[in-house]
Image (cartoon, rainbow, N blue to C red):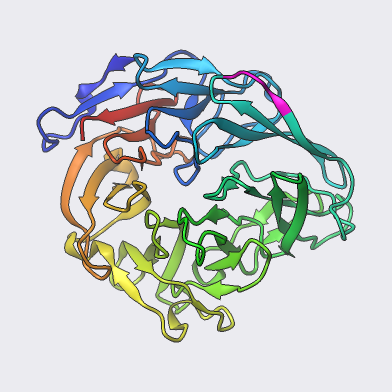
Amino acid sequence: MKSRCDLLAPDAPAGTEILQLTEGDLPSSHIYMEAQIFTPDSSRFILHESAHAHGSDKLDPKHRYLVCDLNDHYALHPLTDETGATAPSVSPDGRFVYYFTDQTKPGGGSLTLKRVNIDGSDRVTILTVDAPLPATDYRPSRLYPLSTIRSDGKRIALSCFLGDGQREEQPFGLMIFNLETPAVELVLSGPSWCNIHPQYSRSTDEEHFRDLLIQENHGNTANPAGDIQRLVGGAGADIHVIRDDGRDFRDMPWGRDGNEFCQGHQCWHGQSPWAITSTGTKDPDEQQLIASLPVAASNHRGLAAPDGQRNHLSRSFSQPCFYHFATDNTGRRLVSDTGRQDQGGRIFLAEFGEKPLDPLSSWTCLAHPRSSWDKRAHIHPFLSPDGTRAFFNSDESGVLQTYMIDNL
């Protein structure tokens, strides 16, 4: 760990500090900002080395997950050493880390769900899937590098490819793992679910805690091995909400009107039933932050879905240009990157209003990460659950590393 206050923005509040958490020749990265990788007391979180901003190579023997202990002088403790470890989630009580080991291939192989204490002790295997998923002929492979855990700690969701490696136009799908039984169930499948980004609601409310935010990509194409050959944006992408039993499919009123499109990142607004997305618009030429509630399914009409509520959160920011963002657990603060490639990016912190339809306010530029904006080195800022620290990636040194903004 070393101080990197040279990356602070001139307008950063007094006392704000930037620390570089990782060093060395291996690229290190925070896990994608929607992942549930923090203990609830904001003291420890998971990151990984020999990795990039969108995941890792499952065959890389150097890839491993680490626990960063913020109360122990930012010490990094190895958590995994298995080749193929992927998709970690920290349990809501902060005691455990669940993750998968990926030994799959299209039409075969195995995936294993494991649990380990947050201190790296008492590693156990929960479930191995080495046969078709129950009530299907599908074998999972090409696992999505992010899992998501329910707020009661009883279910984990993970998406995958379901093809056999031989036939064209094979489906992708969403698996729900019951951590109590244990068991696995396929609740969603089809060729347009190639980039689901599943995210369990953070709510503990009986009405919402089973909800999953999911992304659909109409018109994408993949080869028989599951390699995505065309990942459609613009009119092709829309966002939905579904219960973890596969029922109550709903729409988010975003995009698909010929002017607005979903960029592909979205997250829940804290523990509320509202969700936020980053959109691009042709007129005006902006990248906006839009919050909405789910509405009844209406044939994938996006922004035109009936009864949609929308809040343009970034309307108080002149010419918004936001890409990746996250909120704290209570939904009080939001952090986002912004800027063009030739600017190296900026990181802004903002405050939510008192009412659901208030815009974000108190915009504060915290950092200039000097990122190359290469996809593997995306900034991907996020907040600790208590909102007092922000985290980001940058390859400003020539090697991708992980950073933290302290004393917010």
Indicate whether residue 274 is drawn in magenta. Answer: no
Residue 392, compared with residue 229, is above or below; it is above
Q: Residue at x 52, y 59 (%)?
A: 209
320 or 361: nearer the viewer: 361
Q: Is residue 370 left or right of residue 17?
A: right
Q: At which x and y percent is residue 295? A: 48, 78
Viewer-nearest residue: 376 or 11: 11
Q: Residue at x 61, y 23 (%)?
A: 63
Main SS, magenta region, reads loop
First to last magenta residue range? 120-124
Residue most toward the bottom? 306
> Image quadrant of residue 71?
top left
Task: Say which quadrant the N terminus sits in.
Answer: top left
Residue drawn at 72 percent across, 58 percent down: 173
Rendered view: 240 above or below 166: below
Looking at the image, residue 88 sits to the left or right of residue 348; the answer is right
Q: Quadrant of the C terminus?
A: top left
Picture coordinates of residue 232 (x, y %)? 58, 63
